[in-house]
Image (tube, grey):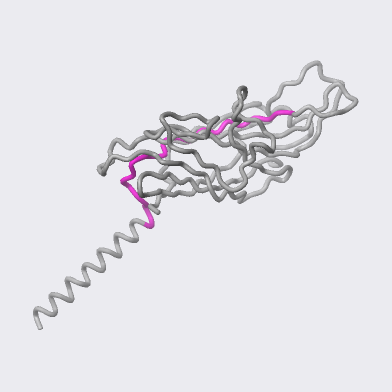
Amino acid sequence: MIKSSIAIIVFALIIILVAALMIRYQVEGDKNMPFNLSKIIVVSTAEGNETEGKKKWNFEIFQNNDMYIYIDKNEQYWGEEKTIKSVRIENIQISKEPVKGEIKAYMPNSLDGRVFDYNNDYLVEDKLEYKGAAQSDPKTLEIGSNGGSILISFCNTGLGVYSSDKDDEIIHDGTLLNKIDLLEEDINFDIAFDLVISVENCSYRTNIKMTMPCGNLLEEGTCSIEKTDMSDLIFKRE
């Protein structure tokens, strides 16, 4: 009976320990990843696409938020050496729609010139995947296998058309939104998406939530935010 009691107690302690570890993992996630999400930078502004009209200035105005995501090797990782196979952005959700406009996601431009070309050729429909390579190259959707960066842009389209003969010049930034009588609360939106870092035989997933655009765009024209505190993000192994 004593041996049976000891066995039952040991078994119960093991169950309690395993349950505690599982609960901790659900709350804190994986704390020993070969690569860490180190930084997210968002640059917000606005632009105008020239359209036909009888005025001197005829622009369809949109507001863009270019996001740069940096993934670095974890120098504290104590497992087997790993390299990045791919990094994916999936399950893009607009948790709070803007009062005006429609949110679309764009991949980087593959041609020479500007980083993003906001047309249907570069729309992100389902997911955006960067493959591991010798170094990061947004034009070919590649990220350095030992760490690098990926890019995506969240754009608010269909905000309105500006037609006028009044201005001597037009500055393509957030101040354009004033010309079509938009307010900050008209263009604010919340976005969420999954970020998946895949290495050999394993993937790590987290969900990222952000409010856009950043800063006082209508006055500043262009603004940016840098997120380096990732304590609110929980990565879990798949």
**Of 77 and 3, the residue lying toward us:** 77
Magenta: main secondary structure: strand
Decide whether residue 32 is among the magenta residues. Answer: yes
Left or right, 21 with respect to 91, comes to left
Q: Specify the quadrant of the image occupied by residue 108.
A: top right
Q: Position of residue 208 (x, y in %)?
A: 50, 46
Report the residue that reaches farthest toward the right: 54
Q: Specify the quadrant of the image occupied by residue 54.
A: top right
Q: Position of residue 121 (x, y in %)?
A: 67, 37
**Residue at the image position 40 percent from the left and 48 percent from the top:** 204
Image mark count: 0
**Residue at the image position 59 percent from the left and 48 percent from the top:** 126
Q: Specify the quadrant of the image occupied by residue 103.
A: top right
Rendered-image quadrant of the C terminus: bottom left
Decide whether residue 156 is among the magenta residues. Answer: no
Q: Position of residue 65 (x, y in %)?
A: 61, 35
Report the residue that reaches farthest toward the left: 2
Per the rendered image, the range of residues in magenta is 26-48
Q: Position of residue 235 (x, y in %)?
A: 40, 49
Rendered-image quadrant of the N terminus: bottom left
Left or right, 156 with respect to 78, comes to right
**Residue at the image position 53 percent from the left and 48 percent from the top:** 90
Left or right, 207 with respect to 176, comes to left
Left or right, 64 with respect to 74, comes to right
Report the residue that reaches farthest toward the top: 168
In the rendered view, tell whether residue 110 sits above or below residue 198. above
In the rendered view, tell whether residue 218 sits above or below residue 200. above
